[in-house]
């Protein structure tokens, strides 16, 4: 991976120097063996390499002897202050504090732009996420997909990609007719009829339908409810779907999520795009008639079986509009298409990648992230969630109880595919046990120190970063230097969880520094250097939390 941080600069510098050291001893072409990373234990320098161990078979030298020779011949430069051989053949590198501290000047110059890069080279990315059917309220698991998709878009944009967010509204299938059926039954119930004893098994029984039925009744007081037969289901379903979409937009906006586009399946169907994709695949030679149905020959492209697109009764399967939608995504010129799907969609991956390849696009340009299940816990009690049975936890209720910031953080701190327990009690705590509070409190502490310093009215002195020598200061400098590479890694790996992990580490290092050092005491030059250091920490905390869609309060 190309490095965009001072941390990466040091790694690259040492790799080049080690390659020269090996070549000087007659060992050419060993650069691929050279790795430089952070030590796993304290006291082993700032960076470590095991290259002497890895090339022992080639050099025919004992690893410790080779490492000792390299360390003894190493010439100190502006980056590396000291090199020591250790253990069975490791090389430990200690960097110049002055060189490390220059990251503060980088942050001061870049401001809020520190951490951004051109890693993505402007590649256009479409992220489709949430895409909840508009037949009921937004629920907790939708919130996890919303947090992941929105944060991933923010991270990609910071890393030099051009990412757009899209919500696919499934308003063209049978679920809308089913919603219309449910609304018609609730309308009868509102005028006194008993309907629950004969409620069909496949019709949504949730109480949330009552409010939609009441709203429709208020808008159409003159309609005779008994006249609403099956031919009315589409009209009622469209009315309900529009209401639920408006709710979805409002709840997601309150959760800090905005979409560039809400793409409607109904529009896709009205444009005859499903029929067009079948015809296109047929012309390409990838359709087959069998048993009265029409099949997409997806096995040709690695799928585990061929897929029915038109059933024997002439109706299209759900795969067809999805196929048409993805053809449209690529036709719009996106370099990468990312779908966030629920854990029940694993079987969707093979067929959709087969479709993309059949249409002539590189299949690896379609990336599908599976979002793991969420269990909502209240203490030791599991809060049951089932939208179809009418027992569910709306996302807006979770936000109201836990807050936007804890909810987003908890959804983002694990890899997307990992199932998670959402601890409501922990989310509401306002102490260091709550990880998002712990990070935000670091920022509030820094704001407090800076306010205190400004109130003292002390005049500025020339900034001399060489004063930053303590282990706590060096740890903070090193973490600040790593931040741009953390953002790039999160973007390239499509793994937003790297950012909260980094922020927790940075906050922990600051809290340790705060406990051990008297920031506003001592000589004015030391105070000035430490103030510049914590201002840089504050800027990176704010930047990282913004990538997660989380606020950084000045007071807590």
Image (spheres, rainbow, N blue to C red):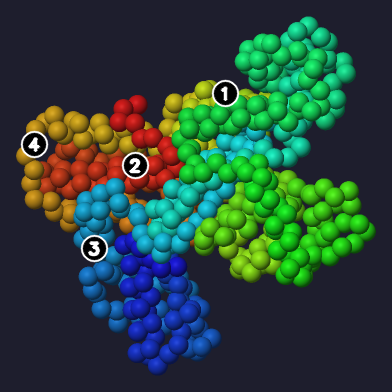
Q: Name the quadrant of the N terminus.
A: bottom left
The label nearer to you, 3 versus 2, is: 2
Earlier-in-chain disc, 1 versus 2: 1
The residues tagged by marks 3 and 1 sit, at their Cα atoms, a distance apart of 50 Å
Q: Position of residue 62 (x, y in %)?
A: 48, 83
Q: Mark 1 or mark 4, which has the lower sequence index?
A: 1
Residue shown at 61% from the left, 30% from the top? 242
Q: Which residue is mark 4?
A: 458
Please give the label number shown on residue 99.
Answer: 3
Callout 2 touching callout 4 (CB < 8 Å): no
- Look at the numbered discs 1 and 2 and tell me whether their residues touch, using CB distance below 8 Å: no
- Camera-near label (3 vs 1) is 1
Identify which residue, 103 or 353, lies in the foreground.
353
Regarding mark 3 in the picture, which secondary structure is present there? helix
The residue shown at (48%, 50%) is: 164
x and y, in percent, of residue 11 in the image = 37, 69
Q: Pointer 1: what residue?
A: 397
Residue matched to label 2: 542
Q: Quadrant of residue 517?
A: top left
Q: Is residue 351 above or below residue 58?
A: above
């Amino acid at each position: 991976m190309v490095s965009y941080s001072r941390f990466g600069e040091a790694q690259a510098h040492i790799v080049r120097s080690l390659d020269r050291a090996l070549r000087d001893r007659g060992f050419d072409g060993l650069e691929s063996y050279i790795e430089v990373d952070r030590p796993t234990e304290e006291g082993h320098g700032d960076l470590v390499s095991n290259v002497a161990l890895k090339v022992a078979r080639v050099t025919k030298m004992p690893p410790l002897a080779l490492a000792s020779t390299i360390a003894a011949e190493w010439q100190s430069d502006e980056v590396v202050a000291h090199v020591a051989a250790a253990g069975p053949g490791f090389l430990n590198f200690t960097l110049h504090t002055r060189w490390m501290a220059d990251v503060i000047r980088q942050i001061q110059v870049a401001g809020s732009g520190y951490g951004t890069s051109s890693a993505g080279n402007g590649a256009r990315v479409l992220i489709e996420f949430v895409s909840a059917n508009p037949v009921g309220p937004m629920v907790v698991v939708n919130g996890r997909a919303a947090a992941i998709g929105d944060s991933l878009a923010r991270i990609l944009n910071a890393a030099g990609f051009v990412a757009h967010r899209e919500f696919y509204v499934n308003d063209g299938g049978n679920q809308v007719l089913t919603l219309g059926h449910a609304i018609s039954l609730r309308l009868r119930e509102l005028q006194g009829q008993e309907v629950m004893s004969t409620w069909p098994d496949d019709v949504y029984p949730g109480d949330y339908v009552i409010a939609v039925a009441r709203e429709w009744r208020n808008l159409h007081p003159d309609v005779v409810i008994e006249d609403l037969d099956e031919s009315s289901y589409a009209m009622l379903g469209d009315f309900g779907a529009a209401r639920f979409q408006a709710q979805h937009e409002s709840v997601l906006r309150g959760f800090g999520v905005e979409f560039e586009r809400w793409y409607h399946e109904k529009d896709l169907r009205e444009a005859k795009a499903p029929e067009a994709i079948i015809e296109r695949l047929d012309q390409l030679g990838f359709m087959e008639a069998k048993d009265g149905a029409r099949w997409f020959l997806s096995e040709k492209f690695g799928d585990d079986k061929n897929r029915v697109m038109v059933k024997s009764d002439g109706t299209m399967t759900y795969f067809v509009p999805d196929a048409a939608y993805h053809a449209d995504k690529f036709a719009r010129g996106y370099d990468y298409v990312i779908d966030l799907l629920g854990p029940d969609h694993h079987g969707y991956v093979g067929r959709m990648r087969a479709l993309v390849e059949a249409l002539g696009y590189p299949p690896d340009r379609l990336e599908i992230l599976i979002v793991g299940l969420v269990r909502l816990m209240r203490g030791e009690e599991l809060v049951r969630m089932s939208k179809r049975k009418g027992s569910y936890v709306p996302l807006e209720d979770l936000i109201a109880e836990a807050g936007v910031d804890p909810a987003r953080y908890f959804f983002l701190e694990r890899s997307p595919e990992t199932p998670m327990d959402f601890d409501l009690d922990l989310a509401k705590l306002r102490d260091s046990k709550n990880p998002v509070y712990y990070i935000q409190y670091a920022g509030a502490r820094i704001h407090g120190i800076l306010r205190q310093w400004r109130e003292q009215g002390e005049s500025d002195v020339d900034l001399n970063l060489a004063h930053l020598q303590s282990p706590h200061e060096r740890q903070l400098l090193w973490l600040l230097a790593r931040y741009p590479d953390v953002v790039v890694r999160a973007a390239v790996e499509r793994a937003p969880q790297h950012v909260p992990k980094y922020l927790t580490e940075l906050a922990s290092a600051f809290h340790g520094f705060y406990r051990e050092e008297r920031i506003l005491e001592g000589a004015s030059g030391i105070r000035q250097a430490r103030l510049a250091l914590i201002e840089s920490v504050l800027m990176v905390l704010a930047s990282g939390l913004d990538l997660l869609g989380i606020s950084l309060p000045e007071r807590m």
